[in-house]
């Protein structure tokens, strides 16, 4: 049985977008399986985080995420619309977050079909590569799902039939992330060892290579 890397991942995280193609290539290189475990954005999982955020954090985050994407040769722009409804100055969150919940639940439905990785790759490109305004309108999501080998209508029907079960699965993934030793995304977990952030992929590769050498 192939080794597994769990990837705790969010559609709203730019670093999740930046990391996933590299992780897919890493998994292919080492013959391991990626188990993409979608979680809601931090704004839903830990809204208090934004109430105490240092005012310098968001400007740096915006600069660094764009720079990291450029470094890795990925097209990049903040999603239009942002999946999280949030005041850009005060960072106050609205009570309802329908777009983020829609994406998270669809990710769970895709995972139930064994297609979390291709679905997350395609939908994150739709959100972050800057080619589409209004990713939530028209056929954009349906076309992204089709590129992943999925039928968006079938995914949405699964969610509509039992939204609470999909929310529960998202909560279980968040619990598993914290049990693994972190709270942020992307976090990769290999043989019980967490590696947080897209800037830890090279260290994860080193660990995989070390294991390959140890077991020949």
Image (tube, rainbow, N blue to C red):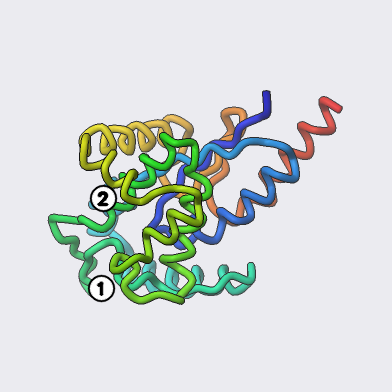
Numbered badge on residue 19: none
Q: Position of residue 84 (x, y in %)?
A: 27, 61
**In the picture, residue 142 is in which quadrant?**
bottom left
Residues 44 and 125: in front is: 125
- Dot 1 falls on a residue whose secondary structure is loop
| The quarter of the displayed image where residue 198 is located | bottom right
Q: Give the image location of residue 182, x and y in percent.
A: 45, 40
Q: Residues within 10 Å of mark 2 (few under 14, many from 20)?
A: many
Q: Dot 2 lies on which element? A: helix
Q: CA distance from mark 1 to mark 2?
A: 20 Å
Q: Is residue 26 left or right of residue 138?
A: right
Neighbor class of circle 1 (other Cα within 10 Å; few <14, some 14-19, many 20+) is few
**Residue in view at x 46 percent, y 62 percent:** 14
Give x and y (percent) for residue 70: 59, 74
User: In the image, what residue occupies the spot 62% across and 49% down?
Assistant: 23
Seen at 67% across and 36% down, the residue is 32
- Mark 1 or mark 2, which has the lower sequence index? 1
Is the residue 106 above or below the residue 52 in the image?
above
Can you say which quadrant of the picture contains the C terminus? top right
Q: Where the N terminus falls, by quadrant?
A: top right
Query: Where residue 9 sits in the image (x, y, percent)?
Result: 45, 47
Q: Which residue is mark 1?
A: 88
Where is mark 2, residue-wise? 101
């Amino acid at each position: 049985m192939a080794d597994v890397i769990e990837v705790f991942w969010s559609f709203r995280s730019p670093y999740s977008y930046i990391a996933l193609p590299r992780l897919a290539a890493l998994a292919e290189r080492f013959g391991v399986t990626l188990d993409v475990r979608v979680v809601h954005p931090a704004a839903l999982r830990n809204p208090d985080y934004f109430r105490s955020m240092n005012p310098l954090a968001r400007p740096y985050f915006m600069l660094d995420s764009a720079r990291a994407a450029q470094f890795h040769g990925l097209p990049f722009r903040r999603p239009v619309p942002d999946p999280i409804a949030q005041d850009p100055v005060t960072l106050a969150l609205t009570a309802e977050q329908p777009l983020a919940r829609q994406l998270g639940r669809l990710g769970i439905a895709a995972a139930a079909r064994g297609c979390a990785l291709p679905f997350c790759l395609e939908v994150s490109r739709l959100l972050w590569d800057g080619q589409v305004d209004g990713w939530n309108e028209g056929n954009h999501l349906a076309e992204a799902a089709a590129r992943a080998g999925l039928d968006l209508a079938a995914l949405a029907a699964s969610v509509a039939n039992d939204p609470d079960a999909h929310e529960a699965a998202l909560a279980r993934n968040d619990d598993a992330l914290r049990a693994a030793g972190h709270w942020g995304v992307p976090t990769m977990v290999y043989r019980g060892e967490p590696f947080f952030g897209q800037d830890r992929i090279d260290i994860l590769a080193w660990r995989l290579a070390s294991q390959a050498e140890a077991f020949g």
